[in-house]
Image: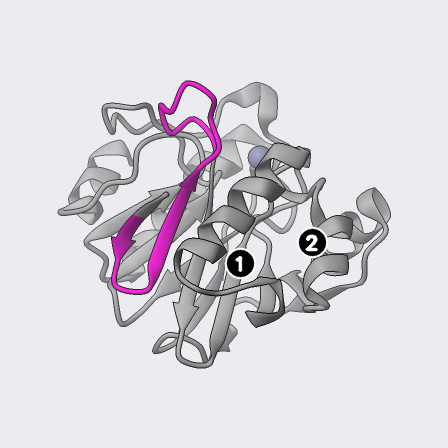
Amino acid sequence: MVKILRNVYSIDHSEAKNHSMESWILDCSEGVILIDGGMTPQHVENIENELKSINKNWSDVVDILVTHKHGDHINNLPKLVDLTNAPVKSHKLEAPLIKSAVGVEVEGLEDHTVLNYCGGIELIHVPGHSEGNCCYYLKEHKAMIAGDTIFGDENCNLSPPPERYCLDVDQAKDEIKKLMDYDFDVLIYTHGKDIMDNAKAKVKELI
Ligand SMILES: [Zn+2]
């Protein structure tokens, strides 16, 4: 468990503890938000331990946000919905795909929807990795939660998502430019070590 920003916690699910698999908890004054849920029972346990460590429990979770439909982000959703009773939300193109994959109701959100938690969380549609792949921008923290929009390694070297995992790798690469419209210092992403300063410049270099 790592507190990476005020009210933002990154859970490193990787067994090697090299940040090759993360999900996140936001402890907002409006309630706890879970972003992506992992895929194994161990990941559920990791999330539970994280909640306990900040004196919260499953019933404090008010929303489950999902970046995209791939199994390592959604396979635990039925269990997590059972535990929290919280609604699951994603971009509108991804919602029916997630529902058909794991059988939970998913509310589809429009591009640029701002959720009123933690000073505003904006959904940014960045297709290519999957149809409705998205990032969540934390305005107050100047932080971009990029999910699989960008990959990296334990030394913060960034790369586009690998072709074998992408619906359309050219589109996935091209759409990363969309992040340049936002002011962010911190880049939080699933597969690689989060970048805690000067992140926008590093993403610009990648583009
Ligand atoms: Zn993915």
Percent x, y for residue 146?
A: 42, 47
Percent x, y for residue 184?
A: 23, 57
Determine if the magenta segment contains residue 15: yes
**136 vs 139: above or below:** above
Confirm whether residue 112 shows in the render: no
Distance, label 1 to label 2, CA atoms, is: 10 Å
Q: Are marks 1 and 2 in contact (CB under 8 Å)?
A: yes
Between disc 1 and disc 2, whose residue precedes? 1
Question: Residue drawn 50% across and 50% down?
Answer: 126
Q: Which residue is mark 1?
A: 34
| Of residues 2 and 90, the one drawn nearer to the viewer in this rendering | 2
Task: Give the quarter of the image for residue 152.
Answer: top left
| Of residues 9 and 186, the one drawn nearer to the viewer in this rendering | 9
Locate the N terminus and report the quarter of the image it occupies: top left
Q: Amino acid at mark 1?
A: Leu
Q: Is the residue at mark 2 in contact range of ligand 1, meaning its CB lies under 8 Å from it?
A: no
Q: Amino acid at mark 2?
A: Leu
| Of residues 167 and 86, the one drawn nearer to the viewer in this rendering | 86
Question: Residue drawn 32% across and 64% down?
Answer: 7
> In the rendering, which numbered label is found on residue 80?
2
What residue span does the magenta drawing correspond to?
3-21
